[in-house]
Amino acid sequence: MARRLITTDQRRARLGERHRLTLRTRTDDVAQIADDLIALHATDPATVYLSAAIRMPDPSIATIERALYDDRTVLRHHAMRRTIWVATPRFTQVTNAACTRKIATVERRQTLKYLSQTPGITDPEATLADATHTFLELVADQGPLSTRRVGIVAPELTFKVVAGSGKFTAEVGAHTRIGALAAFETKLIRTRQGGSWVSAEYEWELMDRWTDTDFTEPTTEDAMATLIEAWLDRFGPGTERDLTWWAGSTKTTVRKALAQIEAVEVDLDNGEVGWVNANDPLIVGEAGLATSVEPWVALVPSLDPTVMGWKDRGWYLKDAYVGKVFDRNGNAGPTIWADGRVVGGWAQRPDGTLARELFEPLTSSQMSALDVEVDRVQSLIGETRFRVRYPSPNTKELLGS
């Protein structure tokens, strides 16, 4: 049987609704927003709030904080590609089993290596076990506590560890490494931020005191199948390269997951072979559902799941703009989107106003919609100032840096 063709226009047409970037699909349910994207990038603290807010009819920092810290309908945890994400408890469980367990094993091995090359440490295993016990007991007794506060209360945990290898070594406080490892291993979780929603300093709390999510389930293989199926439902079609990169996994693992969920191959109009779920509307005769959507414009923050969802980006980002939007490590800066494609970039100036650059002309209605979105984001940010942690070349140009 011949493979079904899915065109670039079809992919762009349904992106806005799938990712809640159209006016009609906005919601103030933060957990639903996270779920519809699988997870929100949280490496850059401001991204979580901006990614959620642009998808809300009534954007509110307080609403997002309530979901994170009071209702706890979303959790902050390491997952794909060692990145920190914010996801619902269900998807935190899935991504932990599919991705984080393996990462945690690597992190533990790396930490033991660093301890072994630190002068004065003769038993890295015992040192790590004792220091982790002290850290966890301290959080249990006095938490939530920031890493800085842990260092003040328990200075014995701040001994220097030699990290890196060869010429590229640096001394880091042991407590910073211990806290991060305990988070990878689901013993600790990052909770409230220090004083501001753009702060990168978090308070640690015991994971099992913060959430009743069971991190012993599911199996890694079943979790990866669930994760790949969810990605295809929200981001598909995608190539094997997209899936391998996004999940931070191997081709063998991704292929097993695709076979387990009985995913279907399709042709993409760039000549590549893509994958979709067997019930994808574009292959079961419901193509109209994917094309009759309203026009939309969005101001998307750096590292947003929509811009970071694929390794092969040519269908939504022209090759000429890749070097403007992404840095050398593949981190995307803030982007302007119109009807399923990147058309520009934006940045917050030191005075709080938003600078923007269009890579190509927009229609008058698109320009009007863009002005509305700029005002919405500007109003949300208010007097807060934030810096993009991984500024793209376009971001640097807009800020004159």
Image (cartoon, grey):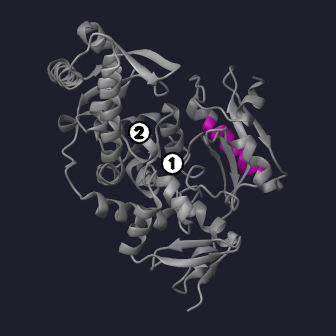
Q: What amino acid type should be assigned to the residue bearing mark 2?
A: Thr
Which residue occupies the extreme bottom position in the image? 1
Q: Residues under labels 1 and 2: Cα distance? A: 10 Å
Which quadrant holds residue 183? top left
Residue at left 58%, top 27%? 382
Above/below status of 400 relative to 355: above
- Residue closer to the observer: 379 or 389: 389
Instruction: Tell me which label, 1 or 2, sits earlier in the chain.
Output: 1
Cβ–Cβ under 8 Å for marks 1 and 2:
yes
Residue 212 image position (x, y, % from top left): 18, 45
Q: What residue is pinned by disc 2?
A: 63
Region rendered in magenta:
367-377
Residue 5 image position (x, y, % from top left): 64, 80
Q: What residue is pinned by disc 1?
A: 56
Residue at left 52%, top 53%? 245
Q: Main secondary structure of the magenta part?
A: helix
Residue 134 image position (x, y, % from top left): 17, 19
Check disc 2 and report its element: helix, strand or loop.
helix
Q: What amino acid type should be assigned to the residue bearing mark 1?
A: Met
Which residue occupies the extreme right position in the image? 361
For the N terminus, give its image quadrant.
Answer: bottom right
Q: Residues within 10 Å of mark 2 (few under 14, many from 20)?
A: some
Above/below status of 202 relative to 87: above
For the C terminus, give its image quadrant.
Answer: top right
- Residue closer to the observer: 246 or 194: 246
Does residue 229 appear left or right of residue 333 in this picture? left
